[in-house]
Image: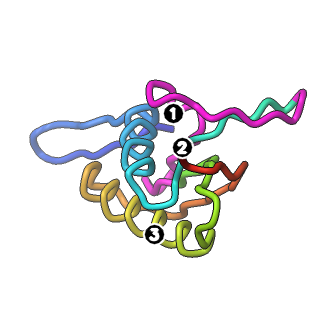
Amino acid sequence: MTGKMENELGKVVIDNEVIATYAGSVAVECFGIVGMAAVNMKDGLVKLLKRDYLTHGINVDVDENNKITIDFHVIVAYGVSIETVADNLIHTVKYKVEEFTGMQIKKVNILVEGVRVID
């Protein structure tokens, strides 16, 4: 389902891909996030995605009440507190996506798929 807003002037429909792209760009700017991860379910392999393919590591779902749930598959930097990184990511994405879309975030799920040493 896509996000919808309606007022006396008309209707605005926001595609899930737009929300995923924005959320991905916000996420990679957060401390401790190396990038989004693509998981190959068949082989169980995790691959770091390039900046152009951020949306492949993000799933966006909009429910019937127009609330957004976002799942992030991320790779975190080695040596950082995963709890701190996740907390920062949740709060930053929640604030920025709500401001961007005008819709409410219901839930942000973070799936840590790997750890990478930053050079």
Name the quadrant containing residue 109.
bottom right
Residue 61 position, x and y percent, is 55, 45
Q: Please tell me how crowded label 3 is: few (under 14), some (14-19), or many (20+) other residues with Cα within 10 Å.
A: some
Q: Please tell me whether mark 2 or mark 3 is closer to you in this view.
A: 2
Secondary structure of residue under mark 1: helix
Q: Which residue is mark 1?
A: 55
Q: Earlier in the sequence, mark 3 or mark 1?
A: 1
Specify the amino acid type for callout 1: Thr
Q: Nearer the viewer, residue 116 or 97?
A: 116
Secondary structure of residue under mark 3: helix
Residue lying furthest left in this view?
9
Specify the amino acid type for callout 2: Gly
Residue 99 position, x and y percent, is 25, 57
Residue 15 position, x and y percent, is 40, 32
Q: Which residue: 47% across, 63% down?
A: 89
Mark 3 → mark 1, Cα distance in angstroms: 20 Å
The mark found on residue 18 in the picture is: none
Q: Which residue: 69% across, 32% down?
A: 47
The mark found on residue 35 in the picture is: 2
Q: Number of numbered discs present? A: 3
Q: Above or below — where is 79 with respect to 63? A: below
Mark 2 → mark 3, Cα distance in angstroms: 15 Å
Q: Above or below — where is 12 with respect to 64? A: above
Mark 2 → mark 1, Cα distance in angstroms: 11 Å
Q: Which residue: 45% across, 69% down?
A: 88
Q: Which residue is mark 3?
A: 88
Residue 13 position, x and y percent, is 32, 35
Q: Please tell me whether mark 2 or mark 1 is closer to you in this view.
A: 2
In magenta stretch: residue 32: no
**Magenta-drawn segment:** 42-68
